[in-house]
Amino acid sequence: MSKKYCLRINNPGNREIDMDKLNDFVKQLYITKSKDKDSKKLNFVTYSFGKDSICLKITGNPTLKNIEEINVKLTEEDLQVEDSGIYLSEPYVLDATQALSFDVTPGRKWDSIIQRGPYFSEIMKPYEYLGASLYLDEQEYKLTREEEKFASLYAKRMIAEDKGNITLTYTKPSANDNSAKRKARNLFNKNFWSDFYRELSPNGKIFFKKDQDPREIDWTDLKERMIEKESNAKQVKDKDPKSRKDAEILAEYGYVTINNVPFQKLGNYKVEDTGIFYGRGGNRVLGKIKKQPLPEEVTLNMGEGDPVPPPPPGHRWGGIVHEHKNEWFATWKDNVTNRNKYVWLSSDGAFKAQSDAKKYEKARKLHRRIEEIREDYMEYAKSDNKIKLEIGTVLYLIDHFGIRVGNETDEDEADTVGATTLLCDNVQLVPNGNHVIFDFDGKDSIHFYKDLEVDPVIFKNFQELKKKKGGSEQIFKNITSKNVNDYLKTFDEDFSAKVFRTRLASSIMYCALKGLKIKEKSTKKNIKKEFAKANAEVAEVLNHVRTPSGKANQALEKLKTDLAQATLKKDAKKIQTLTENIEIKENVMTVAINTSLSNYIDPRLVVSWTKTNKVDPRDIYTKTLFDKFKWAIDRTEEDWDWETEPIEDVDEDEDVKQPSTRTARQRPSISRPPKQQSRLPPPQQSSTSRRPPPPQQSRLPPPQQSRLPPPPQQSRLPPPQQSST
């Protein structure tokens, strides 16, 4: 969370307060006291925190430094609000801590939740009617307010596609058209019109056909009015009122108090606005209209004695529940997918921090035992038992290549593939060198195409498993992801196929950073470039690929043109800068490095590397990731080692299962697979036992002993959700 300063309002005479004027007073106070009198260069906005305080939302370190210098110099006279009898306190920090645990009743995640409930933008700020018309065969149809609200969704997509920044177009043909894109486009328009037609008035249903193709309609009038509205909004010089209102909404709705620990930030405190559903790949509900739910459809989760927040005027809550083992605060049903949507803490919140800490420790625990597990699943891969053979083969793919385990696709999702659900068409065998070509659409319809060398045992298994099967038949007919996960839990209840991807990503990054030393006086740009190279290795293995947008390609071409011109002019400094910029862009042009950095690479090994190399973690992590991994940044020392650091206890509550005590049968000694050999020696235990290794004493404090400071005790602020506003 960005640093925020607040000034408490003292009103001994209980006078009526004009909050807008008070905000302007505080803003002018800081501008007057600033060394830089140009308010445009001071990136902050003041806003009301209920009726209790005026706060400053600050953007950028230069402004923060300036504000902190002013705070020290403020006098009692400065804080008197003219002759109103109202005065302000000295500025204090509005603190938000990233707690790794709360003091709770055993078996619960929390005891008390005080919240404001989600924010309904369409109720609080209804759609602004533009009075537009649609045209069909040169005949005009005047849209009603409700019709225009839904029609604007399609027009918005058309405007975005006209700008050329979208790779996949739905309202018009694309440059690289093919049958799959045409099929998706037709589905999009069919689904949109089906939903839009239901929203039309009786006159609209007479004017338009039920099976109308929206591409046959002239949307020009609506598009032009929307573009004009957007243009007018950009020309408004004073942005403060909107920024102030946004900050006040965040202050009121964006935080909860959990077990008396305030300012726990929510990730999605606003229910989603009405919009078009896109999803990923050829989703069956592509193009359907997803409506904003009403308060009557929303259920809140809170403690039995916690105050119920008031719903928007004229509405009521759908229900109140007290599910202490769940981490969500509000839920409703998505009208398109029929799935529940939830309000959670933000990615840098306490529950996510706890979950991440456990996830990465499980991956390290798996890494300690990876050789033992490899020996065992390779024995399975050699078995005459079909189930064992398939489990061993699938685990080889998951372990070495990071392929997801694969699960059955829901009815409304695109057909995607994982290791257990590979079809014969997805696998092509190349006999020379034991190569296998994998070609399929994985999670989120991301295409996976790789030519990979496999162990001879695995290659032989594929030959046998593909015999007498058609192209659309599954290769592994006898197992599902459950069989794979059940097998892994015979080693440790914390192990699953998901943990393998985290282990693989962290292992690759650990080895890459081991050899990456940052030279003294290296620029931030050079540090980012070198780190991105290491990060890209992980992204490539995990298949976090992306298609560069037209805008990205244009930006790269411009850099290359500028480089050619600089070379002609022999401008050495500019040549070096442009060369670095081109290399940075090309390194990450086709891979999404932030996906692995956010979800798969243990942040502690990154933080340890930054501290060893005297690099600021902010030079590596975006602000969002820096906040998300604050728990790791605060706790990790420079000598922390991903492979050798003692494993922390991840079994913190009753919901986490204890390690299995079952033992394995006797098995013969076999050779290890040729790739991904661990640098660790095998655990010191019997090679035939699946009992977990003995617990080791951690040098780190357990998660519940957070080093983070508690919220400031001097604050008399009520929690945001209790704001009288």
Image (cartoon, grey):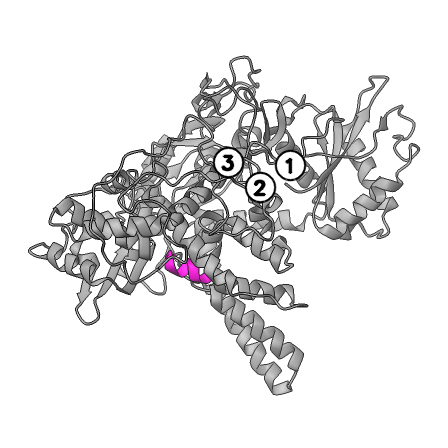
Left or right relative to 78: residue 249: left
The residue positioned 34% from the left and 50% from the top of the image is 370
Q: Name the residue at the left extreme.
A: 468
Mark closer to the chain start, 3 or 1: 3
Helix, strand or loop at label 1? It is: loop
**Residue 708 numbered mark, or none:** 1
Question: Which quadrant of the view contains residue 479?
Answer: top left
Left or right relative to 632: residue 46: right
- As for residue 163 lying within the magenta part, the answer is no
Pinpoint residue 404: horizontal percent, then vertical percent.
31, 49
Left or right relative to 414: residue 424: left
**Residue 631 numbered mark, or none:** 2
**Above or below — where is 684 with respect to 107?**
below
Binning the other alpha carbons within 10 Å of mark 1 as few (below 14), some (14 to 19) or many (20 upward) gives some
What's the magenta region?
536-543
CA distance for labels 3 and 2 = 9 Å
